[in-house]
Each structure stands twice: as structure tokens, then as C-alpha cells.
Image: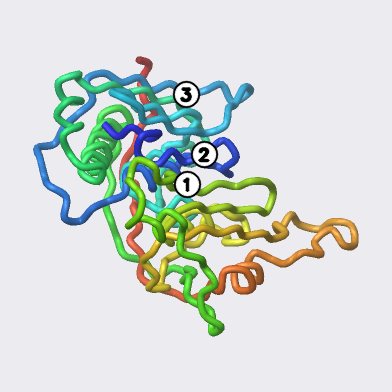
């Protein structure tokens, strides 16, 4: 299975609701990935957490173990079906508890299966992991769903008229002169309120981080910049925290900072979006 720290080593301790950002980067879908027979976890536990003693949601993928801590079923569906974390309108239907009740999930692979998966590329392992998680959700939650296309309000990330101000990453610029083992590993993190830092990060990762922000309003964000490189950047803005004292929100908004600092723009539009509709689901029985 994917070893998250070995793949990207994203510092996630400062991320806002980091779980899906981690997984979307660590187990990104590869359309041309090799297909192997459906697999399943050898053993898994699913337990609802005490709502009076909640803990921050997180995901850990290490060795032969997959853990999702403090996550709702809707969030687990987003992991399993490779959805953008901030796009809350891509999962619909089902009772209210699918978006409110939180669970701790721990699953382990058979050691022999883990060895087989280690022989695959990171993308191929990610594809298999998502298939295994889909099977787990179907088994434990009796989850039945279907896909449908719905026209939703989204944001497209495009290049501003002034052009991109993103700087090619140091790792990418010096790749021809450095051994791959000496390159800094890719990461993206929130280094404080309204401060987003990227190192050797691509636009897909930036889009995922942006989608988490409350200013986006749960819309899907699509990368339409056409930029395929990796970049180092720092984005600073004043988060929309609601009404406050005069001068509390004196800094640039997320939308303004994107354009002024990175030469990018969030363009509102509507587009057909793949939506997952829950047809049937049950609370998991005791393990």
C-alpha cells in the first residue's frame, strides 16, 4: 500500500481539514494504470466516535495499514471515489448522519497482498486502495450508490491577464544537475492563518488546497491554467472570518491575493459535474 511519508511527505499538521488533501495527493488517479483483480482488506474495524470527545479528522497510510480517524461517511466516499475535498455538493442523498456522524476506520492488508502492491507504481497502488475502500464501505455500511451528471456552480482556476507569477520550483530547475535522492520532497501546507506555502507543488495540489477554503463555498475547483510544471510559492491573504472590528479584514481577499501574488484567477461558472447519489446506506454494526 501507499506509504504516505515515502511518497510526498506533505506536512499536514497545519492543514485545514487535511484528510482529503493528503489522500488526493498521495493516491491520485491514473487513467492508464494497470488493472488487476479487485482486492479487499484482510481485517477492518469501523467505530463511531463519541460526539462529546471529537478529534480532528486525519488519514494515515503506512505499511500495511490504512487509518481514517474522525471522518464522516461522506468524507470516506470522497476518498474512495477520488473527489475534491471541498466540493460538498458532489455527494447527495442518504440520511443526515452520513454528513455528521464521525467514525474511526482501521484496515489492514494481508502481508502477501501488501508485498504485491509494493511492486506497483504509486498511482496503481492508489487505484487499488480506493477500490478496496469502496468494497469496505459497501460491506460495512451496506452502501449502494449511483453516478449522475448535474450542472453545478464551480470555479475554474485560470491564468490572469497579467500572466502567471508562479516561480518554477528549485527542485525542477536543478533536476538535471542533482541526483533525485538529494531533491527536496514536494509539499504544500498552511503555515498560519491565511498563509499557504508550496514547495515543488503542482497546480492540482494547489486546487485541492484552495477548495478547502470557506471563501470557495463548497464549489468544485477545476484547474484550467494549462500549467503543467511544479512551483515554489507563498500565498498570503486575509481569510473571510465574518464580521469583525474595523480594520480586521484589511488585507487582500483570497481572490485578490491569488491574482496579485500568483497571477491566477478564480473564475465562477457552471459546468456538468459527476455527482454521487446515495441510494441505500446503513449504520455499521458493532465490530
Query: x and y percent of residue 11 in the render?
Result: 52, 39
The quadrant of the image that shows the C terminus is top left
Q: Is residue 63 left or right of residue 68?
A: left
- Among the 4 quarters of the image, the one containing residue 236: bottom right
Q: Residues within 10 Å of mark 3 (few under 14, many from 20)?
A: some
Image x and y of residue 149, in percent: 31, 65
Circle 1 is placed at which residue position?
187
Q: Are marks 1 and 2 in contact (CB under 8 Å)?
A: yes
Q: Residue at x 39, y 25 (%)?
A: 105
Q: Residues within 10 Å of mark 2 (few under 14, many from 20)?
A: some
**Residue 48: mark:** 3
> Within 10 angstroms of label 1, few (less than 14), some, or many (20 or more) residues?
some
Residue at image coords 44%, 68%: 152
Q: Earlier in the sequence, mark 1 or mark 2?
A: 2
Q: Which mark is residue 11?
A: 2
Nearer to me, 257 or 44: 257
Amino acid at each position: 500500500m501507499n506509504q504516505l511519508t515515502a511518497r510526498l511527505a506533505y506536512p499536514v499538521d497545519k492543514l485545514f481539514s487535511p484528510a482529503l488533501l493528503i489522500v488526493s495527493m498521495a493516491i491520485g488517479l491514473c487513467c492508464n494504470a494497470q488493472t488487476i483483480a479487485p482486492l479487499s482488506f484482510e481485517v477492518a474495524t469501523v467505530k463511531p466516535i463519541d460526539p462529546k470527545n471529537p478529534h480532528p479528522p486525519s488519514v494515515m497510510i503506512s505499511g500495511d495499514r490504512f487509518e481514517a480517524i474522525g471522518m464522516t461517511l461522506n468524507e470516506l466516499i470522497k476518498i474512495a471515489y477520488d473527489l475534491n475535498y471541498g466540493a460538498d455538493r458532489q455527494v447527495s442523498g442518504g440520511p443526515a448522519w452520513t454528513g455528521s456522524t464521525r467514525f474511526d476506520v482501521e484496515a489492514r492488508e494481508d502481508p502477501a497482498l501488501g508485498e504485491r502492491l509494493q511492486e506497483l507504481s504509486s498511482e496503481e497502488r492508489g487505484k487499488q486502495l480506493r477500490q478496496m475502500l469502496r468494497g469496505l464501505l459497501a460491506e460495512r455500511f451496506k452502501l449502494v450508490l449511483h453516478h449522475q451528471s448535474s450542472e453545478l456552480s464551480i470555479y475554474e482556476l485560470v491564468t490572469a491577464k497579467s500572466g502567471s507569477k508562479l516561480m518554477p520550483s528549485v527542485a525542477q530547475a536543478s533536476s538535471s544537475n542533482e541526483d533525485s535522492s538529494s531533491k527536496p520532497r514536494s509539499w504544500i501546507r498552511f503555515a498560519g492563518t491565511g498563509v499557504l506555502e508550496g514547495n515543488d507543488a503542482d497546480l492540482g495540489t494547489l486546487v485541492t488546497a484552495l477548495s478547502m477554503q470557506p471563501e470557495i463555498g463548497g464549489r468544485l475547483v477545476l484547474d484550467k491554467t494549462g500549467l503543467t510544471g511544479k512551483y515554489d510559492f507563498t500565498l498570503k491573504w486575509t481569510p473571510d472570518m465574518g464580521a469583525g472590528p474595523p480594520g480586521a479584514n484589511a488585507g487582500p481577499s483570497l481572490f485578490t491575493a491569488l491574482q496579485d501574488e500568483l497571477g491566477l484567477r478564480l473564475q465562477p461558472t457552471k459546468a456538468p459535474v459527476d455527482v454521487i447519489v446515495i441510494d441505500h446506506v446503513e449504520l455499521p454494526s458493532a465490530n
